[in-house]
């Protein structure tokens, strides 16, 4: 029995020793699996170059999305104060109009009455003015009482106020009181465009009656479009008023439009994003209101460790650099990458610092050699 137990113990001990050796071998393999040693000829053929990482300010790119829109001051709702029937209009949504262009002709009997009232008030004012001048002369000669003179002055002032108020009503209706006379009284008024822009809405047709509260047309001054972007709260601090952004559309990403940040709304919306309003340096009619757009904004990063783009390799969805540990030995070290600019990219690794010696040229050639087990 003792002999059996002793044999079992020896067998267990042997198995344990073999297991320990395998673990040691496995550990040794893991230590060596991300390191490769090359011969002088291999280094020469691969044309490797080594150098040190540098601390630089690499500009970052913040990507934004938004739409083209028109500010409230550039959207005009056209109406007419007194209402009437639409006699003529040729407008359709999408048409371009010039400032002063005829939009519609409106007719109604009240326009005749208003013009008649104004011309009558004008005549009465001129009559009262003549009477005032006459009473003024008589009063100066003491041939007329002060009370009568004051009454004449009050009558003239009343007629003047009434005539001025009617003139304002006519002006709101688009009738020029300076050229108005009894011979050119009209039952129609013309609705003219107050801006140069685009017709976005048409709410009338010929024969329709419109009231003073109705909107006839909506016009947009498209040359004054703005770009409204959304920036998430974590990125807002990277943006500032006056900062330049590069804008492009999904239809033509290669075509870039320069713009500057005009306003940043510091109040976050429901998506925890702030509205960033940009103005184009030069208007382009390809940027129509409602169009979805993208933008890229450059910002200054803090000074961090950077290496040339050729120093970084990607393998199995991870990024690496090769550290020259000694002579012809190269170690593959994982890194986190950041922004890139002018051929340099930010990296972060606890194993790399300014004094590290890394491969800065033809790192991918070294990766291929490494994957082929050192053969070249």
Image (cartoon, rainbow, N blue to C red):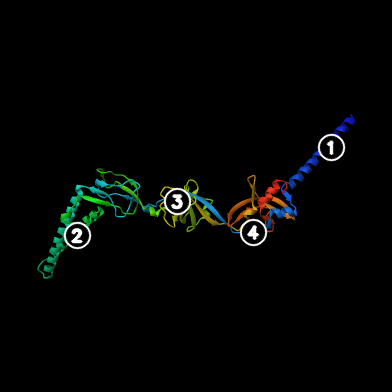
Q: CA distance from mark 1 to mark 4?
A: 53 Å
From the viewer's perspective, is 136 left or right of 19?
left
Mark 3 vs mark 4, foreground winner is 4
Label at residue 160: 2
- Numbered tag placed on residue 228 in the rendering: 3
Residue linked to disc 1: 14
Nearer mark to the viewer, of 1 and 2: 1
Q: In 3D space, how far apart are the residues under numbered discs 2 and 3 (Cα atoms)?
A: 51 Å
Whether the residues at callouts 2 and 4 have beta carbons within 8 Å, the answer is no
Element under label 4? strand
Q: Are marks 3 and 1 in contact (CB under 8 Å)?
A: no
> SS for tag 2?
helix
Tag 4 residue: 54
Total marks in image: 4
Q: CA distance from mark 2 to mark 4?
A: 83 Å
Density class for disc 3 (Cα within 10 Å; few <14, some 14-19, many ≥20) is many
Sequence order check: which comes first, mark 2 or mark 4?
4
x then y, percent, for residue 46: 69, 53
């Amino acid at each position: 029995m003792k002999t059996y137990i002793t044999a079992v113990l020896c067998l267990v001990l042997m198995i344990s020793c073999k297991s320990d050796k395998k673990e040691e071998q496995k550990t040794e393999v893991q230590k060596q699996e991300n390191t490769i040693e090359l011969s002088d000829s291999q280094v020469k053929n691969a044309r490797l170059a080594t150098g040190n990482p540098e601390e630089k300010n690499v500009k970052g790119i913040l990507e934004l999305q938004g739409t083209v829109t028109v500010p409230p001051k550039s959207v005009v709702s056209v109406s007419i104060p007194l209402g009437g029937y639409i006699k003529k209009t040729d407008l359709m949504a999408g048409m371009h109009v010039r400032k002063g262009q005829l939009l519609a002709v409106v007719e109604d009997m009240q326009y005749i009455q208003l013009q008649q009232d104004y011309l009558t008030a004008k005549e009465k004012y001129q009559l009262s003015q003549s009477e005032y001048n006459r009473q003024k002369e008589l009063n100066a000669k003491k041939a007329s009482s002060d009370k009568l003179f004051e009454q004449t002055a009050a009558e003239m002032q009343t007629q003047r106020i009434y005539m001025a108020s009617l003139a304002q009503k006519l002006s709101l209706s688009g009738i020029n009181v300076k050229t108005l006379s009894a011979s050119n009284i009209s039952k129609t008024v013309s609705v003219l465009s107050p801006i140069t822009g685009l017709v976005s809405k048409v709410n009338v047709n010929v024969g329709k009656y419109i009231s003073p509260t109705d909107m006839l047309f909506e016009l947009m001054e498209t040359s004054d479009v703005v770009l409204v972007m959304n920036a998430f709260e974590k990125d807002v601090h990277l943006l500032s008023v006056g900062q330049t952004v590069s804008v492009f559309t999904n239809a033509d990403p290669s075509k870039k439009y320069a713009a500057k940040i005009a306003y940043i709304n510091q109040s976050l919306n429901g998506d925890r994003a702030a509205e960033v309003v940009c103005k184009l340096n030069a208007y382009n009619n390809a940027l129509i209101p409602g169009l979805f757009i993208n933008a890229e904004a450059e910002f200054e990063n803090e000074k961090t460790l950077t290496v040339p783009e050729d120093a970084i390799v990607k393998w199995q969805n991870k990024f690496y650099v090769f550290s020259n540990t000694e002579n012809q030995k190269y170690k593959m070290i994982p890194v986190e990458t950041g922004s890139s600019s002018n051929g340099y990219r930010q990296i972060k690794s606890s194993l790399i610092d300014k004094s590290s010696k890394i491969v800065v040229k033809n790192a991918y050639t070294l990766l291929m050699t490494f994957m082929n087990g050192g053969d070249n």
